[in-house]
Amino acid sequence: MNKLFQFSTIFGILSTVIVVTSARSQNQPAPSLPRTPANTIFNVRRQQGNCPRTVRLWTSFRYYEGGGEHTVIADTGAIAGTARLISSNKKVAEYRAPLNRTYASCVGQANSNTDDFPYRFRFGSGNVTFRVQLPADTPSNPSEISYKGVVSTRPVVRWAIAD
C-alpha cells in the first residue's frame, strides 16, 4: 500500500509539471533578444589558445503557482557564428556554434557550478558548445525543458521546475 501511495504521489507531481509546462509554453511567444546587457557572467578557464575572458547569459525567472520558469539566452554573438541545436531531450539541450577567427584556437570552459544555473560552455575544435543539463527529478522538484531555439544566432532554452 505504501509503494502505491508513493507511486501515486510521484505520478501526480510529474503530471502536474507536464501539464503546467505545456500550458505555460503554449501561451508564451518565443523569446526575443533583450535590449539590456546580459545579466549573468561566467569566467572562461583557458587551457590553450586565444579565449574570451568571459561569456555571458541573459537569464530570467518567472514564478507561478506551483513552480517557476527559467529562460536563458547564451550571448555568443560577439564570439561565434550561428548556433545550432545538436542534442536534446527533456533534461538536456546542447548547441554548437563556430568560433570567430579571433577565438578559433581557444580550448577551455566556463561553468555555472550550481544546480540553480545548470549551464556550461566548452571551447575547442574551433567551436563553442553551450549545454543546459537539468538535474535528475526528485519527488519535490521535477523539471523539464519546455523550449529550445535560436534567436539572433544565439541559443535559447526555457525550462520549468515545480516546487
Image (cartoon, rainbow, N blue to C red):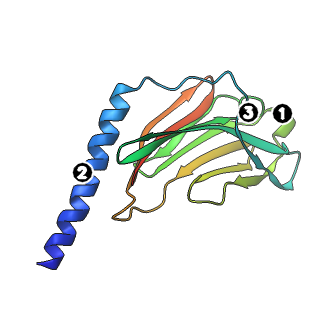
Type of amino acid under label 2: Ser
Q: Which of 78 and 68 is in front in this view?
A: 68
Seen in the picture, residue 35 relative to 96 is either above or below; the reply is above
Seen in the picture, residue 85 relative to 112 is either above or below; the reply is above
Name the N-terminal-most of marks 3 and 2: 2
Type of amino acid under label 3: Ala
Residue lying at 20% horizontally and 68% vertically, measured from the top left: 7
Quickly name the residue at label 1: 101
Cα distance in 3D space between marks 2 and 1: 47 Å
- Secondary structure, mark 3, is loop
Looking at the image, do the residues carrying marks 2 and 1 touch, with CB atoms under 8 Å apart?
no
Residue 34, picture quadrant = top right
Residue 50: where, in percent of width, then height? 89, 45
Residue 33, picture quadrant = top right
The quadrant the C terminus occupies is bottom left
Residue 143: where, in percent of width, then height? 40, 52
Name the N-terminal-most of marks 1 and 3: 3
Quickly name the residue at label 2: 15
Quickly name the residue at label 3: 80
Residue lying at 56% horizontally and 55% vertically, measured from the top left: 116
- Secondary structure, mark 1, is helix
Q: Nearer the viewer, mark 3 or mark 2?
A: 2
- Secondary structure, mark 2, is helix
The quadrant the N terminus occupies is bottom left
**Is 94 left, or right, of 48 in this rendering?**
left
